[in-house]
């Protein structure tokens, strides 16, 4: 899950514009972004910013506005963005557009609850009303098929679809049980596990840089990524359940929120900066 925030566009658009790339704004669509890249590729020499633009924003099949609002694009420009660094960027947002870019865990809990209580709840209700089973499949994760649903080759399509619909009906009940307090309790647990569980880093592949390795934790209501040892590494949280769309999906998609959080946990001697 990549963190997307519309406010990041202020910095990415400013960066590419100041680098001399014209017509980059909050209205730019894929056609314009790809046209800009075609012009850039005609040049004998390209700048770093031009290469970055074509790699992250103007590439084929990319959504330019999503990429401009993506934390990965922002970190290509500024490097790894700790909570302290993100707060400095936050202070640079113009008046009238200023918003919090680093949230407390209480604020994240409310926003994740709002996602469950609003967009996800409505999407589940609408898809269950629809007789087209394809929309039901949007709510089934790969591990659900392995662990919670019968094998289609064993029971046949009709029984599999009935089981899938029943599973999503149970998921609807699960969403109805979510509360801000329950989400916050999960956040507290995953953060405590992240910081105080020693040696929970995954094995480092040969040739990988240690600092590039992150860990992932999940719970009933939230998922998290962070670095196993570096307390300044950005911590991102997002909902544990959300629709998963394939290339055949038609129509609008539910935007899944992800947030950078300020953990505010006490430090121990084993943690490094």
Image (tube, helix red, strand yellow):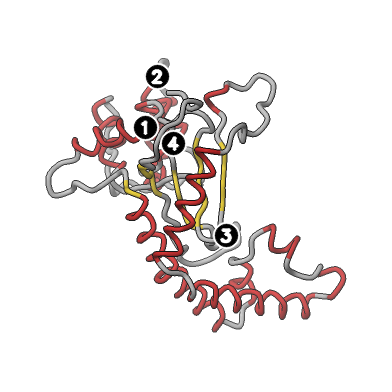
Give the foreground label among 2 and 1.
Answer: 1
Closer mark to the observer between disc 2 and disc 4: 4
**In the rendering, at what x and y percent does residue 145 appear?**
72, 63
Image point (36%, 41%), residue name: 264
The alpha-carbon separation of the residues under discs 4 and 1 comes to 13 Å
Please name whichever residue, 246 or 42, is drawn nearer the observer in this view of the structure.
Answer: 246
Q: Residue at x 72, y 77 (%)?
A: 163
CB-based contact (under 8 Å), mark 4 and mark 3 = no
Q: Earlier in the sequence, mark 4 or mark 3?
A: 4
Q: Which mark is residue 82?
A: 1
Residue 113 higher or lower than 108, as above or below:
below
* In front: label 3 or label 1: 1
Question: Residue beneath label 4, please?
Answer: 72
Could you tell me how far apart the alpha carbons at marks 2 and 4 are, in whole angstroms? 21 Å
Q: Earlier in the sequence, mark 2 or mark 1?
A: 2
* Nearer to me, 73 or 178: 178
Q: Considering only order in the chain, which callout, 4 or 2, is on the residue closer to the N terminus?
A: 2
Instruction: Give the residue at x 46% y 53%.
Output: 187
Task: Kindly identify which residue carries mark 2.
Answer: 46
Question: Is there CB contact under 8 Å for labels 3 and 1?
Answer: no
Q: Is residue 68 visible?
A: no
**Pointer 3 residue:** 244
Q: Secondary structure at mark 3?
A: loop
Q: Tell which of 77 and 272 is nearer to you.
A: 272
Disc on res. 272: none
Which mark lies nearer to you, 3 or 2? 3
The image quarter containing residue 169 is: bottom right
Q: Gap in Å between the C-alphas at discs 4 and 3?
A: 21 Å
Q: Quadrant of the C terminus?
A: top left
Residue at (37% x, 66% y) in the render: 114
Residue 167: % across, % down: 65, 75
């Amino acid at each position: 899950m990549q963190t997307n925030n519309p406010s990041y566009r202020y910095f990415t658009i400013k960066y590419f514009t100041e680098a001399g790339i014209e017509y980059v704004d909050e209205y730019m669509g894929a056609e314009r972004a790809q046209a800009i890249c075609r012009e850039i590729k005609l040049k004998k020499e390209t700048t770093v910013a031009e290469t970055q633009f074509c790699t992250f924003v103007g590439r084929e099949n990319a959504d330019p506005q999503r990429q401009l609002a993506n934390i990965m694009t922002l970190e290509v420009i500024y490097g790894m963005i700790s909570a302290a660094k993100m707060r400095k960027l936050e202070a640079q947002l113009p008046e009238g557009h200023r918003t919090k870019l680093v949230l407390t865990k209480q604020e994240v809990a409310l926003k994740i609850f709002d996602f469950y209580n609003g967009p996800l709840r409505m999407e589940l209700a609408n898809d269950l009303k629809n007789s087209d089973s394809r929309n039901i499949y949007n709510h089934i994760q790969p591990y659900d098929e392995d662990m919670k649903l019968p094998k289609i080759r064993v029971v046949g399509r009709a029984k599999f679809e009935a089981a899938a619909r029943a599973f999503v009906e149970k998921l609807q009940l699960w969403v109805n049980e979510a509360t801000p307090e329950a989400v916050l309790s999960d956040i507290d647990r995953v953060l405590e596990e992240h910081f105080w569980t020693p040696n929970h880093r995954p094995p480092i592949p040969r040739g990988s840089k240690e600092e590039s390795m992150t860990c992932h934790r999940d719970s009933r209501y939230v998922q998290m990524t962070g670095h196993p040892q570096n307390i300044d590494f950005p911590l991102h949280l997002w909902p544990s359940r959300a629709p998963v769309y394939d290339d055949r999906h038609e129509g609008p998609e539910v935007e899944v929120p992800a947030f950078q959080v300020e953990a505010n946990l006490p430090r121990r001697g084993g943690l490094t900066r």
